[in-house]
Amino acid sequence: MPAEIIFKSRNILVVYNNIYSDNNIWITFNELGFKPDANRFWGDRFLEKNAISGIGIVTTYPNWYPPDDMQIAIQEIRGLYRNRTVVCYGHSQGGYGAIKYSRALSASIVLAFSPQFSINPSVVAKNDNRFTNYYVGSLCNGQPVTSNDVAGRVYVFYDNGSESDKWNVQKLKEITGDSLYEVVCPFTDHNSVQLISESKLGNELIRIAHSESDEKKQALRSLVRIARKSSPTYYTYLFRYLLDKKQRLDKLQTLFDRLPGYLQKEFNIQRHISDGALALAEALLADLTIPELQMLGIVRFMQIARRHGFLTAELRIARAILAERSPDVIARLEAIGTLVKCAQCDAAITELREIVLQYGRSIHGGFIRKLEEELNIYVS
């Protein structure tokens, strides 16, 4: 039976893939960069490969699962998995969703990678402002996780070297107590889930999650230690850490050689910027292909280009962001801002109208109004 969409609203959709009739079902929550595509959901290929039925709760844009939409969606979902063991699984925005709605979904196990406690600016204050721009008061989205929200054993994977992620886990620990188990993933920053995907050890993650053992925490910690040996993400952040500690590049050559080519290019760009050789940095940035920029974090590189006045590179990256129709509305609005700065106003107006038509004016309305003022228009 092919995967089917069983619920859809403006803010979320739910996809059901009932491919196997065992006693387990995984409910996945996507991270903010996941692009809705027909009946695909975050983690679907991973579950199919391991013959596990899945339900994907997918945000149509980064919105941290607004509660009104989720209440209706959960009513549609609950009848699909009676008498099955539920595993909630997600990363970042998805990690938040997996924890926040674990009780409503009757979860026994939660696997949350780099989750947030909240994105409400009045709650997180200066402790974590990475995602507060996605908070919309009228949606009440990304509100704090409470003890009444949480069920099952919650395993949180995170890098304790990331102060923001560490703060979020501490807040979650305060309200979950002994039901939350920390699985530290050093040198992954906000990308802890990459350890599993890059090491091809997803089947082992499933085996541990489904086991009856009371030693899941130790087994998951062992899994992380094994996974990092074949993870480019781990070596990337280890390399960055050692560079920050002023280790000489020649002493790190063996580690540098283990990085993929596109990451080597990034470090050379950052090194030239640090040395003040901006012309060399700009030339290397111009050589990066769009797929390489997407792997490195295309929005981050647009911001790097903007910060250092690499206008040609900034415009090229902005066009690429808009061409891929990313669900990250803020990234698209920033890219439109670049079009305005480069006097490409007709293209900017077309892109802005598309966003307003798709998402409405209430989403990031302040950002939209600012662009309208610069363009001297009102988009309806």
Image (spheres, grey):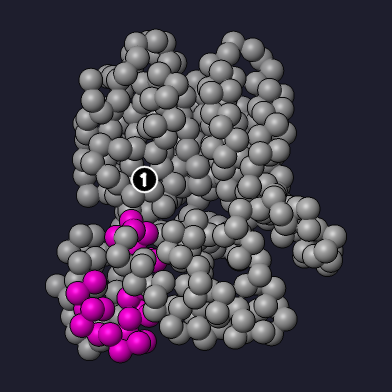
Q: In which quarter of the image is the N terminus?
A: top left
Q: In this view, does 100 lie above or below 292?
A: above
- Residue 55 is situated, as x and y percent measured from the top left of the image, at 34, 29
State yes or no: residue 336 in magenta. Answer: yes
- For this rendering, which residue is in front, 354 or 237? 237
- Looking at the magenta stretch, what is its main secondary structure? helix
- Whether residue 245 is visible, yes or no, is no
Q: Which amino acid does label 1 sit on?
A: Tyr
- For this rendering, which residue is in front, 120 or 35? 35
Helix, strand or loop at label 1? It is loop
- Residue 358 is situated, as x and y percent measured from the top left of the image, at 20, 60
Please indicate whether residue 28 sits to the left or right of residue 174 in the image.
Answer: left
Residue positioned 67% across, 84% down in the render? 277
Q: Mark 1 points at which residue?
A: 65
- Whether residue 74 is visible, yes or no, is yes
Most distant residue in the left direction: 380
Q: In this view, does 57 lie above or below 275?
A: above
Residue positioned 78% across, 58% down in the render? 253
Q: In this view, does 365 lie above or below 160?
A: below
Which of the 4 image quarters holds residue 369?
Answer: bottom left
- For this rendering, which residue is in front, 271 or 345? 271
Q: In which quarter of the image is the C terminus?
A: bottom left
- Residue 379 is situated, as x and y percent measured from the top left of the image, at 17, 76
Residue positioned 64% across, 42% down in the render? 231
Which of the 4 image quarters holds residue 377?
Answer: bottom left
Q: In this view, does 322 lie above or below 176?
A: below
Pointer 1 local density, CA inside 10 Å: few below 14, some 14–19, many at least 20: many
- For this rendering, which residue is in front, 41 or 368? 41
State yes or no: residue 377 in magenta. Answer: no
Magenta-highlighted residues: 325-351
Residue positioned 54% across, 37% down in the render? 197
- Residue 196 is situated, as x and y percent measured from the top left of the image, at 58, 35
